Amino acid sequence: MSSNHQRTGSHFQITERLVFEEGSPGRRGFDLPELDVPRKDVATVIDPSLLRDGIAGMPELSEVDVIRHFTRLSTWNYHIDLGLYPLGSCTMKYNPKINERVARLEGFALAHPYMPAELIQGALEVQKTLETCLAQISGTDAVSLQPAAGAHGELTGILMIRAYHQSKGNPRKKILVPDSAHGTNPASVTISGYVVENVPSDRRGMVDLEHLKKVVDQDVAAIMITNPNTLGVFERDIAEIAELMHSRGALVYMDGANLNAMMGITRPGDFGIDVLHINLHKTFTTPHGGGGPGAGPVAVKKILEPFLPYPTVGRQAGGNYFFDHDRPQSIGKMKAYNGQFGMHVRALCYILANGPEGLKEVSEVAVLNANYIRAKLKDAYAIPYDSPSLHEIVFSDRIQARKDVHSGDIAKRLIDYGFHPPTVSFPLIVPGALMVEPTETESKQEIDAFIEAMLAIAKEAEENPEIVKSAPHSTRIGRIDEASAARKPVLRWRPE
Amino acid sequence: MLAAIGLESIDQLFSGIPEKLRLRRLLDIPRALTEPELLDYFKDRAARNAADYVSFLGAGIYRHHIPIIIDALISRSEFYTAYTPYQPEIAQGTLQAIFEFQTYIAQLTGMEVANASLYDGSTGVAEAMLMAQRISRKNKFLVAKTVHPEYRAVMDAYARNLGIEIQLIDYTAEGRVDMAQVERALGKDVAGIVVQSPNFFGTIEDTALISDLAHRHDALSIINIAEAVSLGILKPPRDADIVVGEAQALGVPMSFGGPHVGFLATRDRYVRQMPGRLVGMGKDYSGKRAFVLTLSTREQHIRREKATSNICTNQSLCALMSTIYLATLGPVGLAEVCEHNILKTDYAVGQIRSQTPHRVLFPAPRFNEFVVQLDDRYASRVERLMQNNIVPGLDLSRFYPELRNTLLVCVTETTRKDQIDALVKGLA
C-alpha cells in the first residue's frame, strides 16, 4: 500500500466478551418507581405453577457496564458515517440526521395505531403524504405502506397479481423471473403459490424480448423484472416487454431496488409497470440499521388498487384522515397495523428535504458517480456487459483470476484500504462479479480514493497476489472459517 | 467528472433510456424544505397525535418504560448506519449483538435456539406456520381465536395460496383456549396448534398442557408471545416446538405500529427449517472468537425459489434495542417490571369490580390486560372518558362482534395509581 492512499492505521480496540460473561450478581442498570398500589405476593394473584424460577444465565449489569459493552462492540463495525459503502444493489447512501430527529418526536414515537382516528391525524397525514409522493415518483395510482421490507413488498405485489387474475377467473400458474434477479424474487414467487420460470438474459445483459414472445402463454401470470436491472442497465425494451405481457393478459411486476437511478428521469408507471415495491432503506435514506428495519411500500396502477392490503389511509370530504378497512377485494393483511411507520416518517422527511429538483439531482449524481468509476476502472477490471451503466457498474475478476485472485479476495483487500467491499458473487450471471454502487452522497475525493485503492489492488494482484488472497490484514479478526461454523453451528451462548 | 467519462452533458448519462420514456417535466411533489422548515412541518404533524392522553391501549403494542440508554446506544452511527453484516471482519459489533439477542430470546422462551429476528410478531406467526408445514408435511392448523386478530389475518393472507387450512378454536368462559375443542379437532392431518399466551384478552394459558396435547396427536405446538415482558416472570413454554412472537415490549417504541421486532425460537433439531438470518459463533484463521452469518443455505440469496422463506432483512436495530433493554434490566429488574404489571392490573380489576357496575370477564390469571364489559351506556361512558383525555382501551367488538360493549384494558408499570383511579371513576 503506498502512502498516498493509505487510509487505515492503528486505532485502539478493546476486546469485549459476551454480555453473558460480564456483570456480577446484584448489579442494576435501572430502578422502578415505588409501587403505588397495594403490594401483594404475585403467587397470590397468579398460580405459582405458571411462574418461572429465575432466568438461567441472564447477566446483571450496571448502566455503565451496558454502555461500555455496546459502545465497545460498536467500534468493531464499519458504517456509512465512516466512509464509502460501494455495495451494488444496496444503495448505501448517507442517512440525514434530521430523519432521526423527526422520527423520535413524541407524537410519533408514542402513537398507538388503535387510537381513535381523531387522535392520530398527524401520523395518518404523514402516511398519506408519503403515499402520494411515492405514487408520483413511480408514476402509479395508489400505494400501500404496509410491507415491512423489499421482499415483503414483493410477496404483497405477487399476491395482488394473483388476486387480480383470480378475479378474472383464473390465477394462472407461472411467474417469469430473469436470471439476473435478486434471490428474493423467486423465493417470493414460491411462497405466493406460483411456479418460477427463469428467463435468460441476452448478450446486452437485458431480458430477451424474442425469447419472451415464445414463452408467454395463458399460464404466465406476470414477469418480475428489475429495472434498471442488477447490472445497472436500463431494460431498453421495457415498454415493449410490458406491451407483450399485457397483450397476453399477464402483468408486469418491478423490483424497485434500483429506483435511485431514475427519480424524475423516468417513471415505472409510464413504461408499463403494473406494480412495484420501493425500498425506503435504499432510495429514501432510512438507515440500514445493521440489517433492518427496512420498509417496502408497494405502488400499483389503478387495475390493482382494489387488491391492496387493508387498511389503506383514506381521507374524508371534511379533510379528516382515517384507516379504511372496507376493502372487499383486498388480499388481506400482510403485517399487523400499517407498516414500519418510523421509516415512513424518515422517508417523507428525505423527500421533502429534496423536492422535485433535488430528487432528480440525486439520480443524476448517482449515475454520474457510477459512470466515473466505470471510466476510471475499465482498463484494470473486466466489464462483462458493456451496455451503458446507470447507478451501478458490474465488473468481474476475469483479469485477476489469472493470478488466482478472485472477487472475494479483492473485496477483503479493499477493507485494508479503508473501504467496505462492493457486492460480490452477484448477479449470478456474472462469474466473479464485483458490483459497485457509489450513490450520490459521495464526494469526488472519496470516490477518487476508492478508485486509487481498486487500481492499487489490481496492481497487487499482478505483482503480489498473496497479499490480496490473504487479506484483510488490518482488521481485529481475520477471515473466518465459515464452513466449520456452519457444520457445527453455535447459535447461542451457554454457561460453561 | 463528465470529461473523464467522455460526455458533455448529464443528460447523455441517460442515453440508455429510450427518449419516449423520459420524463420531461419535474415531479409533482412539494418543493424542497430547509431544515428549520422540516422541523416545523414534522413537529406540527406530531402535535396532532395525542401523546398527552392517558392511554389504556395495549392489544399487541405495549407502553413500557424505555431506559434512556437504549436510544443513546442505538443512535451510534456504528450501529444504525451499518449494512447487513455480510463482511464479518468489519461487522463484528452487529454480529455479536445479534448473537446476544439470539441467546437472550432462547433464555427467555426456554427454547434451544432463536433466530436473528423477523419483521414482527404477525409475520413471525405466519412464518412459524410455514415452518411447521415444512417440518410436518401436513397442511392443517388449529389456531386459537384468542391469537391476536391481526396476526390471524396475516396468517390467512400467507396461507391462502399454499393449501393451508386454518381451523379456529373458540375460547371458554374462563377466557382460555377451549381444550376440549382442540382435542376433538386434533387428528392425523393436523400440522400444528397455534396458541397465544398471554392471549389477546390478557389471559395466561397453560402452555404445557397445550403442548402435551399437541404432541399426543403428533402435532407441533406453536406458542405465540405478543407481550414479551411477561416472559420475565411467567413460566416459559419449554415444551413447545416453536415459540414465536413480538419483542416490541422489550424496549422498542410503539411508533404507530412499527418498526417492531419479531422473534422465532425452536429446538435444535428444527434449526435448518427456520426462516430468517442466524448468527453463529466460530473462529477466525488465527483461532480468535468471531461471529458470522451462518446456515445461509436456507436463505433466498443462495437457494432462490427453494429457500425456507423469502425474507432477506431482519429487524437488527430493533433487536438491538431489545438486547440492550434486557441487559439493562437484568433478570431482577425484569421480574420487578413484571410484578408491577401484574399487581397494578390486579388493582385495576379489583377497583372496577368493587367501584363500578361493570363486569370483568374471564376469571383465569392475567398479566397486564383484562376485558371489561360495560353496561348499555358504553358509548357515552367512553366519550366522557375521552373528554377527560383518557383512552380507556380497545373496543373489542371490532374483532369479536360477540363481545359487545367491551373494552380490552392494558395497565403497565408506567400506569400510575391515580390514572387507574381516574379510569375507574370515569367508568363508575
Image (cartoon, coloured by chain):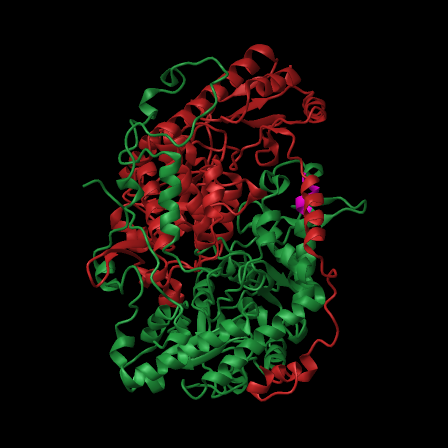
Which is nearer the eye, A76 or A288?
Answer: A76
Say whether residue B113 is left or right of residue A296: left
Say whether residue A361 is left or right of residue B252: right
Which is nearer the eye, A108 or B55?
Answer: A108
Q: Which residues are magenta?
A: A120-124
Which is nearer the eye, B351 or A125?
Answer: A125
Task: Examine the rendered structure and indicate whether residue A433 appears above or below residue A79.
Answer: below
Q: Position of residue B264 (x, y in %)?
A: 37, 46
What is the quadrant of the C terminus of chain B in the image?
A: top right
Judging by colour alone, the chain drawn in green in this rendered image is A
Q: Position of residue A124 (x, y in %)?
A: 67, 46
Q: Residue at x 37, y 31 (%)?
A: B232
Q: Which image quadrant for residue A381?
A: bottom left
Q: Which image quadrant for residue A320?
A: top right
Task: Examine the rendered structure and indicate whether residue A325 appears above or below residue A486.
Answer: above
Q: Residue at x 77, y 46 (%)?
A: A316
Q: Residue at x 35, y 58 (%)?
A: A11
Looking at the image, the residue that sits furthest to the front is: A3
Task: Examine the rendered structure and indicate whether residue B366 appears above or below residue A317.
Answer: above
Which is nearer the eye, A364 or A115?
Answer: A364
For chain B, what colour was chosen? red
Q: Position of residue B333 (x, y in %)?
A: 39, 28
